[in-house]
Image (spheres, grey):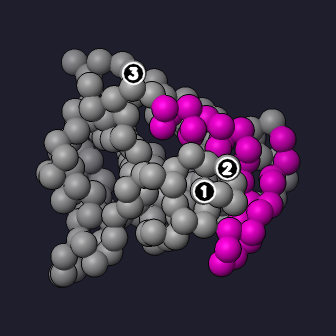
Amino acid sequence: MTRTVYIDVDGVICPFGPEGPTGWGTGWKHSNAGLLPVAYAPELVDALNGIAAMAGVRCVWLTSWEELAPQYLCPAIGLDGARWPYLTADGAGAGAGWWKLRAIQDDVEDTGPEAVAWIDDQLAFEAEAQSWARLLGRRILALSPEPRRGISPAELQRVQSFLVLPLF
């Protein structure tokens, strides 16, 4: 089994202007990620570390942070993602459209995973990405968390279940 999780940072792991409880059981924790302060839920980091350790699962950064996610974010929040590959805007080729869609399409074509989980707060607003996800059908779980909250425990549970359940 080979399954890939593509994950964004801002609005997913680190919400924009979070307020109130995290939804994970504790308050927001704040850390300096080298370039800027970030807020995150430690329980989310623990859960992501668990997903990354699952057999047959490959985690990939798909964020405008690019190489800065493994370099700065991971040590700042305790995420074991320093060795995850990251996709870049320049690697997605030229032309119109969302660079993340072009990058994920290229990576899926190159690596051929059995299934894909894509977590990005912008997905709900990208019609072309939604169309591509519909073409993949059961092979993809596309989640678009609310950016002021980040990924919720229920959404991450959907990812965990998707990664272990048979597709057909």
Q: Amino acid at mark 1?
A: Cys
Query: Which residue does the image show at 65% across and 44% down from the upper left?
Result: 45
Q: Position of residue 31 (x, y in %)?
A: 77, 63
In this rendering, the answer to whether 32 lies above or below 26 is below
Task: Give the labeled residue for mark 3.
Answer: 164
Q: Position of residue 164 (x, y in %)?
A: 39, 21
The reply, left or right, for residue 23 in relation to residue 2 is right
In this rendering, the answer to whether 93 lies above or below 130 is below
Q: Are marks 3 and 2 in contact (CB under 8 Å)?
A: no
Q: CA distance from mark 1 to mark 2?
A: 6 Å
User: Can I make out residue 58 in this image?
Assistant: yes
Residue 78 numbered tag: 2
User: Which is more toward the observer, 25 or 74?
Assistant: 74
Which stretch did the figure color magenta?
26-53
Residue 160 numbered tag: none
Q: Position of residue 122 (x, y in %)?
A: 46, 62
Residue 94 lies within the magenta run: no
Residue 48 lies within the magenta run: yes
Q: CA distance from mark 3 to mark 1?
A: 25 Å
Q: Nearer the observer, disc 3 or disc 1?
A: 1
Q: Position of residue 3 (x, y in %)?
A: 31, 35
